[in-house]
């Protein structure tokens, strides 16, 4: 087993060998994270240093995640693919240098060659020679509401994706499997759209001022009171941009002499906010409680570097759902460690708020925990609510402090009134305060769609990552040439997907990322699954070594798991 795979198994992950009649190898394992006792016949004997006690007493429901190992041959071929692309990239750079091939990238003028370079030529190597080959899979212009279906503007390139031209045609009714429209509120009709229209007629679109000057509207205060009630916290504050909610508020909470413990797969906004704060940053392995506890223990024992004084604050920063892995944070264990070592907890629920929990209140609701155990609750309105912006919730003293010290509060323009109204209306629907069961129906539909879509992909033989309850479904592609090919072939079949590769993912873990929505009908999902299976056969993407007849523990009912 490779070092990276061993690290992923450190946190009490069970490792199951596939029994498909082939000779087993170090890569022929399927990893399931489950915090309930599993039948012995599906367990692989523990290896050395794997005697980790599950904290199953902290969990009120099964916690099941799977990360199947990359097949060895696929990993080798993936590295070879990147190697070949790199060699040809250097060859093309050589041809560009001698003006044999036209260079489209930004370069220094000849008279500036003795200046400090404005454009780092080598740092753009990947963009020039690898990304440009598959650039047509991103930034596609959409000319409709990005709901369950959407319309795309057709475009072509005559210079290998350096520039694009619109053909004037529109690709109609493309099934949208890439947007974060978890509850289907990205729509131009219905209660939310009608309410947003009324708010536009009453307030206009822009506020043209900050909240602390003359941009504080009654609709903003109504929104913040509703968010606090929705989250179950004392107070909350709304911001006009989700990214800035993290990057501009973390520096207001920590500074020099503070320690931030950050999950290695945290979003770029969290990473930027931590760096801007000036705090010391230490990274723990993804969702690995042993790694986190070691850092906490070392921080308390050794204190600050050189002086060994105690840290002013220790802030643990995690996400609810990790958008590239589809995994859910082990929040009960994080809270237990936070209490034990007297640290603070910052929870980013950008993807989990509205998408998880029986009441749609995020990962705290999903695990049945007390919101008061999370010191700073952050989330965005850009996904489940079909709007824009973000929020921070917590104690009243925390929110009052941020109103005076947050750069987003003091210098950013207030949230647009129709956007605020969209959030208010959609949140009331989720809470059932609109007098209907539409919110509960959408939450149930999202859960059913997620379970169905994940199970079907597994049964087809694809390797998918993440938690069984996560609507973010990464499907592994691995090889660089298959990133672009998959996106193009799916679009030919009228399915819009998101494909992701290095450096956004590890170099051998390129993937397609599907986002399931409550707006998807079973017919849409079946159409998408049929196209995925067809393209998977065409590109040979069905890498999984799972035995099809072997029941997946992730799909067992909670009652059966508890009985086991």
Image (spheres, rainbow, N blue to C red):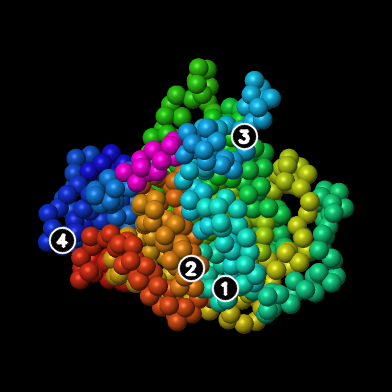
Query: For residue 107, which numbered disc appears in the image?
Result: 3
Q: Which residue is mark 4?
A: 19
Assign a secondary structure to mark 2: helix
Q: Which is in the foreground here, disc 3 or disc 1?
A: 3
Residue 22, position as x, y percentages in the image:
13, 58
Q: Are marks 2 and 4 in contact (CB under 8 Å)?
A: no
Please name the residue shown 51% across and 49% down the image: 132
Q: Which residue is mark 1?
A: 171
Query: For residue 432, which numbered disc appears in the image?
Result: none
Assign a secondary structure to mark 3: loop
Towards the viewer: 166 or 366: 166
Magenta stretch, main secondary structure, is helix
Q: Which residues are magenta?
A: 80-91
Mark 3 vs 2, N-terminal side: 3
State the separation of the CA atoms marked 2 and 1. Answer: 9 Å
Q: Are marks 2 and 1 in contact (CB under 8 Å)?
A: yes
State the separation of the CA atoms marked 4 and 3. Answer: 55 Å
* The quadrant where residue 89 appears: top left
State the separation of the CA atoms marked 3 and 1. Answer: 36 Å
Q: Which residue is mark 2?
A: 491
Q: Which is in the foreground here, disc 1 or disc 4?
A: 1
């Amino acid at each position: 087993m490779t070092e990276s795979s061993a690290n992923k198994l450190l946190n009490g992950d069970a490792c199951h060998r596939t029994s498909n009649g082939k000779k087993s190898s170090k890569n022929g394992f399927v990893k399931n994270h489950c915090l309930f006792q599993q039948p012995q016949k599906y367990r692989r004997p523990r290896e050395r240093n794997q005697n980790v006690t599950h904290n199953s007493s902290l969990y009120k429901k099964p916690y099941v995640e799977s990360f199947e190992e990359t097949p060895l041959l696929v990993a080798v071929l993936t590295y070879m693919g990147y190697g070949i692309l790199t060699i040809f990239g250097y060859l093309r750079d050589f041809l560009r240098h001698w003006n044999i091939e036209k260079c489209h990238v930004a370069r220094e003028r000849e008279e500036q060659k003795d200046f400090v370079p404005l454009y780092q030529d080598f740092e753009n190597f990947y963009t020039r020679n690898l990304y440009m080959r598959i650039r047509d899979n991103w930034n596609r212009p959409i000319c409709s509401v990005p709901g369950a279906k959407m319309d795309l503007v057709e475009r072509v390139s005559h210079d290998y994706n350096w520039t694009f031209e619109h053909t004037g045609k529109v690709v109609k009714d493309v099934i949208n499997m890439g947007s974060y429209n978890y509850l289907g509120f990205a729509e131009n009709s219905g209660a939310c759209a009608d309410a947003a229209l009324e708010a536009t007629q009453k307030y206009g679109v822009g506020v043209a001022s900050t909240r602390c000057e003359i941009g504080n509207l009654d609709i903003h205060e109504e929104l913040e009171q509703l968010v606090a009630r929705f989250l179950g916290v004392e107070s909350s504050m709304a911001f006009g941009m989700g990214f800035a909610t993290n990057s501009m508020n973390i520096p207001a909470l920590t500074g020099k002499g503070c320690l931030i413990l950050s999950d290695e797969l945290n979003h770029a906004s969290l990473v930027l906010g931590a760096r801007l704060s000036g705090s010391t940053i230490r990274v723990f392995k993804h969702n690995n409680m042993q790694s986190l506890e070691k850092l906490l223990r070392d921080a308390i024992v050794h204190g600050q570097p050189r002086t060994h004084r105690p840290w002013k604050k220790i802030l643990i920063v995690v996400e609810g759902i990790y958008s590239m892995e589809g995994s859910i944070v082990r929040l009960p264990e994080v809270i237990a460690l936070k209490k034990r070592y007297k640290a603070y907890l910052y929870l980013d629920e950008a993807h989990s708020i509205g998408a998880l929990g029986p009441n749609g209140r995020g990962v705290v609701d999903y695990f049945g925990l007390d919101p008061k155990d999370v010191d700073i609750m952050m989330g965005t309105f850009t996904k489940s609510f079909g709007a824009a912006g973000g929020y921070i919730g917590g104690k009243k003293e925390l929110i009052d402090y941020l109103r005076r010290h947050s750069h987003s509060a003091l210098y950013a323009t207030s949230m647009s009134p129709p956007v605020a109204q969209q959030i208010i209306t959609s949140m009331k629907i989720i809470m059932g305060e609109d007098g209907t069961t539409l919110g509960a129906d959408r939450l149930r539909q999202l859960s059913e769609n997620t379970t169905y879509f994940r199970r079907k992909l597994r049964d087809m033989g694809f390797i998918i990552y993440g938690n069984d309850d996560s609507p973010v479904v990464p499907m592994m592609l691995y090889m660089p040439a298959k990133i672009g090919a998959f996106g193009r072939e799916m679009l030919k079949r009228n399915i819009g997907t998101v494909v992701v590769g290095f450096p956004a993912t590890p170099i051998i873990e390129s993937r397609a990322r599907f986002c399931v929505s409550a707006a998807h009908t079973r017919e849409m999902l079946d159409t998408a699954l049929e196209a995925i299976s067809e393209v998977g056969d065409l590109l040979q993407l069905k890498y999984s070594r799972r035995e099809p007849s072997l029941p997946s523990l992730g799909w067992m009912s909670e009652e059966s798991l508890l009985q086991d």
